[in-house]
Amino acid sequence: MARELVGDAHFFEVFVDTPLEVCEARDPKGLYKKARNGQLPNMTGINSPYEPPEAADYVTDAQAGDVATIAQDLIKRLGL
């Protein structure tokens, strides 16, 4: 839907593929814990379904490298 609103020429979808367990372990605000305790409704991946993008322009595995390496790869992919 976002791609349609902006148009292909101005849209670049990035998907950082991260297992739910990793998201929970990296959660500094404790939102996943609150969602699991029923304090936070509609948390994606817990009590609301998550649908990965069907055709992201860039896909990376969050566990494949550190943030700097992933960012460098993305910058190269964007041609910047």
Image (cartoon, rainbow, N blue to C red):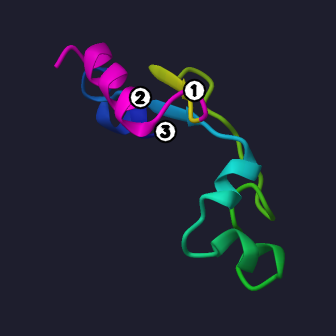
Q: Earlier in the sequence, mark 3 or mark 2?
A: 3
Residue located at (45% from left, 31% from top): 14
Of the two numbered discs 3 and 1 in the rendering, the one whose residue sits closer to the viewer: 1
- Place of residue 31 in the rendered image (x, y in percent of width and height, measured from the top left): 64, 73
Label 3, secondary structure: give it.
loop
Identify the residue under disc 1. 64
Tell me if mark 3 has few (under 14), some (14-19) or many (20+) residues whose alpha carbon lies within 10 angstroms of its own: few
Identify the residue under disc 2. 70
Q: Answer yes or no: do the residues labelled 2 and 1 have beta carbons within 8 Å? A: yes
- Place of residue 53 in the rendered image (x, y in percent of width and height, measured from the top left): 60, 31
Left or right position of 73 against 75: right
Residue 51 placement: quadrant: top right
Residue 61 placement: quadrant: top right
Point out the residue furthest to the bottom here: 39
Counting labels gives: 3
Residue located at (62% from left, 24% from top): 54
Left or right position of 56 against 24: left
Identify the residue under disc 3. 1
Label 2, secondary structure: give it.
helix
